[in-house]
Image (cartoon, coloured by chain):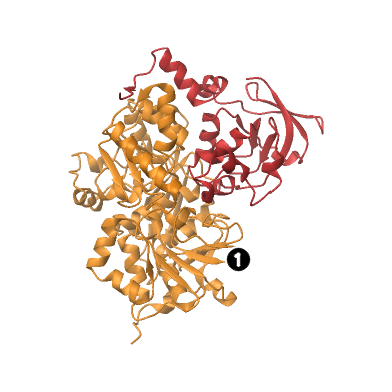
Amino acid sequence: MGETLIQKIMARASGKDSVTPGEIVTCAVDLAMILDSGGPRKIWPRLEQLGVGVYDNEKVIVVADHFVPAADPQSAAILKLTRDFVKKFDIKHFYDMEGICHVLMAENGHLQPGMFCCGGDSHSTMGGAFGCYMAGFGAIEMSGVVVTGDIWSVVPETIKVDWSGAFGEGVAAKDIMLFLARELGMENAFKVVEYGGETIRNMSMMERMVLTNMAAELGAETGLIAPDQITLDAMRAGGTEPAKDALEWRSDDDATFCAEHAFDASTLPPQVAAPHKPSNSAPAEEYEKDQIHVDQAYIGACVGAKLTDLHMVAAVLKGRQVKSGTRLMVAPSSKKIMKEAAADGTLATITEAGGLLLPSGCGACAGLGAGIIAAGEVCISSTNRNFQGRMGSNESSVYLGSPYTVAAAAVAGHIIDPREMLGETPS
Amino acid sequence: MSAVTGKAWVFGDEVNSDVMAPGIYFKESMEVMASHCLEAIDPDFAPNVKPGDIVVAGRAFGVGSAREQAALSFAHMKVGAILAKSYARIFYRNMLNFGVPALIFPEADEINAKDEITVDAIAGTIENKTTGKNYSVSPIPEHLMEMISLGGLMPYLKKKIDAGELKTGAMPT
């Protein structure tokens, strides 16, 4: 009988010939990513309490991305502790203010198809775009992983989601996810979502990572995309030569899925999620009649400020200005992306339109850094969550959209369908 | 682990991690963090919840972030048990790792706020003393039973390490 990709990954990680959904397995962890927020400051005292060190200083990766750069004494102390941890435990891979962890794993060639990886952040699912298992765990559980190098798991069933057709203008991977959050809901715990089909095959890795990142918004254990030539090219760009069997990590044709869905990307319009959950979405044009004033438009986070995202923003902003009474803030997902966007003129387009550049980091997305919002304010954001109070006050409102949609709202001053601002550049 | 009895606090579907542990308090102590738990949807909860009280909820309880503070807030307030129709995966694992029983309870709608509830997580029994109704639920998964009865992941690891049953790295000098 055929096996799904996740079954193959968990069989290898647990040292078995094969595993079946529902089976409880103990998996060896190939990569354990911990962060300044839920990493050393939580884990170090637990290591002291147990009197042990980390299981492998090559496999435990530390990233400082949540409280960067330090804006107050507590953040500075947390970052200092993070750096001290790296020294004390001789951690070999440490990224200090280089960007957001999930994007850094991809940029630096840490992910290989078939790997079993754990991350101390719910959007660790993003790594699944490389055909590996990567899922989020709390700091308490990452403490266990860092000590033992293994973790228990229930082998998940797989929901197969196929997309065919090409996007219309002004539509992006983000729109797929806001649509799916509504269609599939947020209650898919202990299941994996595997994306496939022509639309996904034609996407760059950066776009594919939007789909796996927001598998978290479907409540899924992780998202997966079987590797292909585009995956291998991205690995090489990150300095890693793919293993010979890399392309064999895929679901068999006769594998059993718990659900199968097929959608057409060519008829998908831009989507917007209204407060206070990502599944509360509808086509962007449906919001226009309400003329929802936007105080802040935010381009940021792991999911929404990669180079492809900044290009979408620039496509809307070219020759236009951010509306008076609305502020546009852009926090590129990594330093490398910042550099590339500076080199190709994208940042100039954004700043000429009146956008404000912020440092790379988790920042306002999780209410941690520069750009949080006040009671009564409305933000439209290219990030992945709009839970009540997430970006600041409990009395603020956050809408989610693609980078096109967020940029279009920055120009209009209210939520609109971004397709109205694409095609022709105003003179 | 013995049975616990406490007052029910009832919540709806898809109560998320961010309202359990708001990001804006991440840098504060656990004391401060827990004092803001669920304040966006029920400001009475954190100031009034008592040790042993039972949190009852609908579907996908704890959906969203990996932040352990969402689960740790309930552990910090010494909540006796969580009874939800279903859980978000990371929150469920965090809850058990902190040694607080989280049971799947399809009949959550039959519990009213302030009902007096007794939960025996090992036996998988729930008694609503206010209505007199008894329920049987799936107990804690077998492979986690030892960890839960020891009080969570840390005491469990400690025991295994002390017994020489775990291979780990050494604490650098």
Residue drawn at (26%, 50%) of the image: A107
Q: Position of residue A11 (x, y in %)?
A: 35, 30
Q: Position of residue A27 (x, y in %)?
A: 37, 29
Task: Describe residue A372's horizontal placement relative to residue B53 as left or right.
Answer: left
Residue annotated with mark 1? A376
Please indicate, yes or no, whether residue A348 appears anywhere in the rendered image: yes
**Could you tell me how many numbered marks the image carries?**
1
Task: Describe residue B51's horizontal placement relative to residue B154 as left or right.
Answer: right
Task: Describe residue A180's horizontal placement relative to residue B55 as left or right.
Answer: left
Q: Which quadrant: the C terminus of chain A?
A: bottom left
Residue drawn at (55%, 36%) of the image: B72
Colour-to-chain, orange? A
Quick one: which residue is furthest to the front in this view?
A73
Q: Position of residue B106 (x, y in %)?
A: 66, 37
- Say which chain tag 1 marks: A
Quick one: which residue is furthest to the right in this view?
B131
Quick one: which residue is furthest to the bottom in this view?
A427
Residue type at numbered disc 1: Gly
Q: Give the color of chain B as drawn.
A: red
Q: Position of residue A18 (x, y in %)?
A: 35, 28
